């Protein structure tokens, strides 16, 4: 289906032509007509499906159709991380090029003053992280009384990051009569419960590919002792001359420690996570994109903002506690028909996580031993007693979540 079959503004259609978007993706085909017809929409879609254009195009088109002379906020997009806010902002700018629509991004971790100045000039679309948005609302720099469309992007991550209270406070500042759109890669009970308070008679949109790994991705699993993972990884990167390697860890601490050790191994590596300043994160990403830095170690949340089309190597240094994250992680490679390699380093204690992943992707992942790095089966630690795997997973997720840590 081409974009000209939707009643989108002509300037937007021209921009899509320039961007060489020939066909609407599945989520775009389903969501654009529903949004243009002012429905509330609940959509299950992850990054990489074209979901940003699925909501940005109808929002922009509606604003162009009814120009807003006061430049008061007409659409608000809430996203969990600064990187995602920046990425959505960039998308709105490229899709709305040549229109009069003003788009502003606000997020924490940087000075608030330039954001206040740009808000003073007026804006039609505001893209924001919840915390910074609340600061701006309570200091009266933003008025949301004219809002007509509210979007939640990556709503599951917002709940994972403990933004529920912030969302509730924001809801008290937006008009009752509005269109609400909720995008999420996953839906669990708590998200369904929240969605009932946010959306009215929503139309649901689901696309089928959620847990499918692209055929262009080769999945390789090495069984290795935990304390030899770094050594093995540095060896592979060095001996096989891998460039642009995105490495995932579960925690910020492991990301930092690993990046430091890999630098000592002679591999230029940076870490990327939520405790770093915005400047440091932007720099790390730019250097990784340009090839100045060879490996980037990221946590799942930080990696959501990385939009590199043809990343050749993804490494799971630690397997994710949420099995679906494996699909997100390795979906960073093998895009647009290019081939990619997804390597997972699995210690004996992580085998239950591998089993969970196999169930989600409905595929058996054979563990291999790399000569010289075979696991030492004599030093397997006994499993901890008295604590379930679910509890261990929850504790680890909470430990890595600054908001939950603060609340305890
Ligand atoms: P998203 O899921 O919104 O993060 O989009 C993923 C990538 O797909 C971005 O780089 C978009 O520019 C690109 N994209 C979105 N829609 C289309 C389309 N219809 N045709 C080609 N590329 C697209």
Image: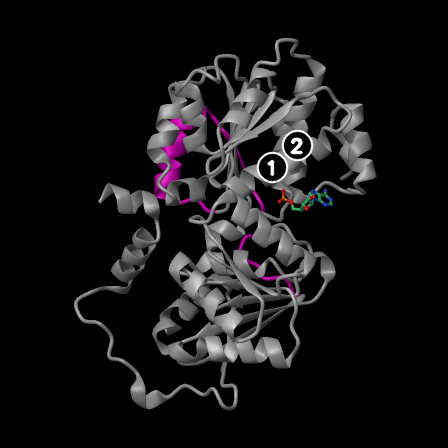
Looking at the rendering, in which quadrant would you find the C terminus?
A: top left
Q: Are marks 1 and 2 in contact (CB under 8 Å)?
A: yes
Q: Which residue is mark 1?
A: 88
Question: Which of the numbered marks, if any, corresponds to residue 326?
Answer: none
Q: CA distance from mark 1 to mark 2?
A: 6 Å
Q: Is-magenta flag for residue 46? A: no
Label 2: few (<14), some or many (≥20) within 10 Å?
A: many
Q: Nearer the viewer, residue 405 or 156?
A: 405
Q: Residue at x 37, y 78 (%)?
A: 348
Quadrant location of residue 34?
top right
Does residue 200 appear left or right of residue 149 in this picture? left
- Can the viewer see residue 251 in this picture? no
* Residue 63 point in image, percent of width and height: 66, 18
Does residue 238 appear left or right of residue 23 in this picture? left
- Magenta-colored span: 186-215
Q: Is-magenta flag for residue 201? A: yes
* Residue 178 point in image, percent of width and height: 50, 18
Q: Residue at x 50, y 66 (%)?
A: 362
Callout 1 secondary element: helix
Q: Residue at x 48, y 18 (%)?
A: 142
Looking at the rendering, in which quadrant would you find the N terminus?
A: top right
Q: Which residue is mark 2?
A: 92
């Amino acid at each position: 289906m081409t974009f000209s079959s939707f009643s989108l503004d002509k300037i937007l259609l021209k921009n899509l032509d320039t961007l060489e978007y020939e066909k609407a993706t599945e989520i775009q085909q389903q969501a654009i007509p529903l949004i243009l017809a002012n429905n509330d929409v609940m959509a299950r879609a992850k990054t990489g499906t074209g979901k940003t254009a699925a909501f940005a195009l109808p929002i922009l088109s509606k604003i162009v159709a009814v120009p807003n002379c006061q430049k008061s906020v007409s659409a608000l997009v809430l996203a969990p991380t600064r990187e995602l806010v920046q990425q959505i902002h960039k998308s709105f700018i490229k899709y709305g090029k040549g229109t009069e629509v003003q788009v502003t991004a606000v997020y924490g971790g940087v000075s608030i003053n330039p954001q206040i100045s740009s808000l003073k000039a007026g804006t039609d679309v505001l893209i924001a992280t919840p915390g910074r948005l609340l600061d701006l609302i309570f200091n009266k720099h933003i008025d949301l009384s004219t809002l007509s469309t509210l979007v939640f992007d990556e709503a599951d991550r917002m709940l994972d990051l403990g933004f529920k209270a912030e969302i509730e406070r924001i809801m008290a500042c937006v008009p009752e009569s509005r269109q609400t759109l909720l995008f999420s890669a996953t839906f669990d009970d708590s998200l369904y419960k929240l969605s009932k308070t946010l959306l009215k008679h929503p139309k649901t949109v689901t696309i089928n590919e959620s847990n499918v790994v692209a055929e262009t991705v080769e999945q390789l699993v090495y069984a290795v002792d935990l304390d030899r993972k770094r050594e093995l990884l540095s060896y592979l990167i060095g001996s096989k001359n891998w460039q642009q390697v995105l490495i995932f860890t579960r925690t910020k601490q492991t990301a930092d420690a690993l990046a430091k050790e890999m630098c000592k191994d002679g591999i230029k590596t940076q870490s990327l996570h939520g405790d770093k300043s915005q400047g440091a994160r932007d720099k790390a990403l730019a250097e990784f994109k340009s090839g100045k830095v060879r490996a980037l170690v990221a946590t799942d949340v930080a990696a959501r903002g990385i939009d590199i089309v043809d990343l050749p190597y993804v490494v799971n240094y630690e397997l994710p506690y949420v099995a679906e994250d494996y699909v997100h992680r390795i979906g960073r490679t093998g895009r647009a028909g290019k081939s990619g390699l997804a390597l997972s380093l699995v210690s004996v204690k992580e085998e239950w996580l591998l089993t969970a992943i196999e169930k989600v992707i409905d595929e058996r992942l054979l563990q291999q031993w790399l000569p010289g790095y075979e696991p030492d089966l004599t030093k397997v630690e006994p499993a901890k007693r008295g604590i379930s795997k679910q509890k261990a997973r929850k504790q680890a997720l909470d430990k890595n979540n600054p908001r939950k840590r603060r609340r305890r």
